[in-house]
Amino acid sequence: MRTWRTLSLRTKLTLWYVSLMAIVLTASAVIAHLYLSHSLRRAVDASLGEQVQLIEAQLRALEEGREFPGSRTERLAIAPAFIELITPEGKVADVAATSETDRVPLHPETLERARKSRIPIGEDARTRDGRAIRVVTWRVLNARGEVEYFLRAGYVTEDIRRAERKLLRTLLVTTALALVVASLGGLLLATRALRPVDRLTRAARAITARNLKERVEVPPSRDELARLADTFNQMIARLDEAFERERRFTDDASHELRTPLAILRSDLEIALRRERSAEEYRHVLRRCLEEVLRLSKLTDDLLLLSRSESGRLVLNFAPLPLDAICRDVIEQVRPIAETRRLNLTLQESGEPLLVRGDPQRLRQLFLNLLDNALKFTPPGGRIALRMERTKTRARVEVEDTGCGISQEDLPYIFERFYRRPSGETTGAGLGLAISRWIVEAHGGRIWVESELGRGSRFIVELPLAGTAQE
């Protein structure tokens, strides 16, 4: 047996539609039947009540010895089955009936209700032979306001009840037929409404990890389904971009890992071909150690990027002096700059630069930028690190007089495994990608200004501690 969760959306929509129609039609039929029954009862009560009051007026005219002028009414004119005159004690003093079987027993409770009521009291009853009858009881007061007698009239409503039952059956049959038509119409409407969803489903099934260039057709109606198809296409585009980025990342990482591994294997194979001196073995081990360090640096960078993109790398934010970090980094790379005969300068802002960040990652950021400048600046060149404070941000610039970057390459400078167009091939091209992630993780921004053959300038802006942009 299928449960509600296993039903198709088309079936669910049809069932909801039919259920709602069933509730509406059934409620309408019940309300119509009750309203008609109530209206007929009120009409019968009004007619009988008017007639007993007319009889009261006739009796008073006879008692006073005057002629009764008669009365005209616009109400439903019905002929009572019986009329009774009842004493205040509840005994029948006089009766006029078409048949003795039309009369109904008198209940003391009815007289008590009529005694207290200012309008005729109506009630449903059954005749002696079981037919439905409507009975109206009316009190007649004397000059002192006491009950002089009661007038009671009844009208057999069996034909009315039969008509009501027939109407009810007609309403039920009509409702059932309407529900059948509604179910077919609901199924047709659901099928037509979900047809674009079926096309979307088939198109989605045709799209795989190897076929992410396909797109689903967007309906021209621009309704909810069109927005769904458009959103689905955007999601596929993002997946395609992510898969392409991962494929490129895998290819580049494999290529970067292959080179040091090939060097390691080659050196070790050559060293093992014959007996060598201790100095030769030390030389091979030094080369192997360099490649191992290169592999370690590459794997550390890859792991860092992977964790940063997945959100698994947690930064330890704390207020810290950015100018002090920059001074420490300058002193750390100064010996390398002197070895390469480069002029390394530091220009401070003259005021404290307090930011909220991770000291380890910020140090890594400026080391990457300075290392990049050291690689691509020829001997005798200049490298400058400048610090500046604006109203809400700390600005750090790393400028060099190196080979520069072409305008065609500038948009890709911060991508993973990008290599600047230079004869220098050291490094895996991950430093600037890591630098961009560090800056963005601190709520800042980084960009580069460069001209081929005239050097480059990398600009980093970080929000100051306590500012709204932090």
Image (tube, rainbow, N blue to C red):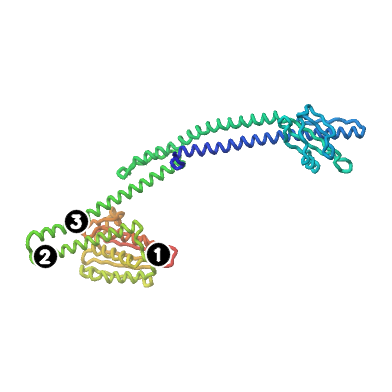
In space, the residues marked 1 and 3 are separated at their CA atoms by: 40 Å
Horizontally, is 138 left or right of 281 in the view?
A: right
Residue 463: mark: 1
Q: Are marks 1 and 2 in contact (CB under 8 Å)?
A: no
Between 205 and 75, the one nearer to me in the picture = 75
Q: Which residue is mark 2?
A: 281
Disc 1 versus disc 3: nearer the observer: 3
Quarter of the rendering occupied by the C terminus: bottom left
User: Where is residue 25 shown, x and y percent of the image?
Assistant: 58, 35
Disc 1 versus disc 2: nearer the observer: 2
- Kind of residue indicated by mark 3: Thr
Residue 184: mark: none
Residue 259: mark: 3
Q: Residue at x 46, y 41 (%)?
A: 4
Q: Residue at x 36, y 66 (%)?
A: 316
Report which quarter residue 443 is drawn in.
bottom left
Q: Secondary structure at mark 1?
A: strand
- Kind of residue indicated by mark 2: Tyr
Among the two numbered marks 1 and 2 on one chain, the one whose residue lies closer to the N terminus: 2
Looking at the image, how many numbered discs can be counted on the residues?
Answer: 3
Horizontally, is 215 left or right of 344 in the view?
A: right
Furthest toward the top, the residue is 98
Among the two numbered marks 3 and 2 on one chain, the one whose residue lies closer to the N terminus: 3
- Label 1: few (<14), some (14–19) or many (≥20) C-alpha neighbours in 10 Å: many
User: Where is residue 195 shown, x and y percent of the image?
Assistant: 43, 36
In space, the residues marked 1 and 2 are separated at their CA atoms by: 53 Å
Among the two numbered marks 1 and 3 on one chain, the one whose residue lies closer to the N terminus: 3
Disc 3 versus disc 2: nearer the observer: 2
- Kind of residue indicated by mark 1: Pro
Quarter of the rendering occupied by the N terminus: top left
User: Where is residue 198 shown, x and y percent of the image?
Assistant: 41, 38
Report which quarter residue 368 is drawn in.
bottom left
